[in-house]
Image (cartoon, rainbow, N blue to C red):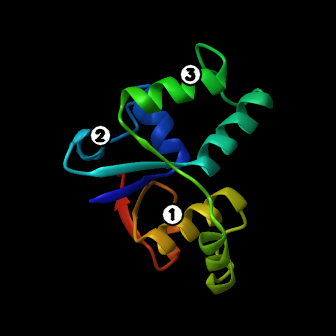
């Protein structure tokens, strides 16, 4: 499986948050799967950290990168072809970070691991987290 982690799923995974189901955690750990974290999610997490809405044990940029590397989660850059998918999307969701993850999922044929009901309204492959 080729899997793109929604921002909250990545954060739940690296902090062992109980909201992440054991099945999804195992899917992320399974070395047969390709697991991606979008640069968009890193951007979103850093914004939340700056605003004081995300507490982390060390500076956010360092912490996120170390944890991503520890868990063999590959960075997914944002490219023009993925952004162009935005023109094909209905306006179900107003969150620009999530809309870019949807675009990347469509462009790169990735499942999205999320618990966000709004994202599930789009024509993407979803790995439900609950």
Where disc 2 sits, the SS reads helix
Q: Which of 68 and 126 is in front in this view?
A: 68
Q: Which mark is residue 12?
A: none
Q: Position of residue 121 (x, y in %)?
A: 51, 75
Work out whether mark 2 precedes mark 3 in sequence or the reverse, and give the earlier one. 2
Q: Quadrant of the N terminus?
A: bottom left
Q: Estimate the x, y position of residue 94 in percent, counting from the top left.
A: 72, 66
Residue at position x 29%, y 40% from top?
25
Q: Nearer the viewer, mark 2 or mark 3?
A: 3
For discs 3 and 1, the disc positioned in front in the rendered view: 3
Q: Name the quadrant containing residue 30.
A: top left
Residue 25, numbered circle: 2
* Residue 95: % across, % down: 70, 60
**In the structure shown, which secondary structural element does the residue marked by tag 3 occupy?**
helix
Query: In whole angstroms, how far apart are the C-alphas of marks 3 and 1?
Result: 28 Å
In three-dimensional space, the C-alpha distance between marks 2 and 3, rounded to whole angstroms, equals 19 Å
Residue found 51% across the figure and 63% down from its top:
117
Mark identifier at residue 117: 1
- The residue to which callout 3 is attached is 63
Question: Is disc 1 placed on a helix, strand or loop?
Answer: loop
Q: Quadrant of residue 124?
A: bottom left
Q: Dot 1 surroundings within 10 Å: few (below 14), some, or many (20 or more)? A: few
**How many C-alpha atoms fall within 10 Å of the one at disc 3: few (<14), some, or many (≥20)?**
few
* Label 2: few (<14), some (14–19) or many (≥20) C-alpha neighbours in 10 Å: some
- Give the mark, 1 or 2, whose residue is nearer the N terminus: 2
Would residue 28 appear left or right of 44 to someone viewing this image? left
* Image coordinates for residue 57, horizontal then vertical, percent: 58, 13
Examine the rendering and report whether any part of residue 118 can be seen: no
Tell whether label 3 touches label 2 (CB within 8 Å): no
């Amino acid at each position: 499986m080729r899997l793109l982690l929604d921002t909250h799923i990545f954060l739940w995974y690296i902090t062992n948050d109980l909201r992440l189901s054991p099945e999804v955690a195992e899917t992320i750990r399974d070395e047969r799967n390709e697991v991606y974290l979008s640069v968009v999610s890193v951007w979103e997490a850093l914004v939340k950290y700056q605003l004081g809405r995300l507490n982390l044990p060390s500076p956010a940029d360092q912490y996120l990168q170390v944890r991503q590397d520890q868990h063999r989660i590959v960075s997914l850059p944002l490219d023009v072809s993925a952004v162009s998918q935005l023109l094909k999307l209905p306006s179900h969701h107003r969150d620009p970070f999530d809309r870019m993850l949807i675009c990347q999922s469509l462009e790169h044929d990735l499942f999205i691991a999320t618990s966000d009901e709004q994202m599930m309204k789009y024509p993407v492959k979803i790995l439900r987290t609950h």
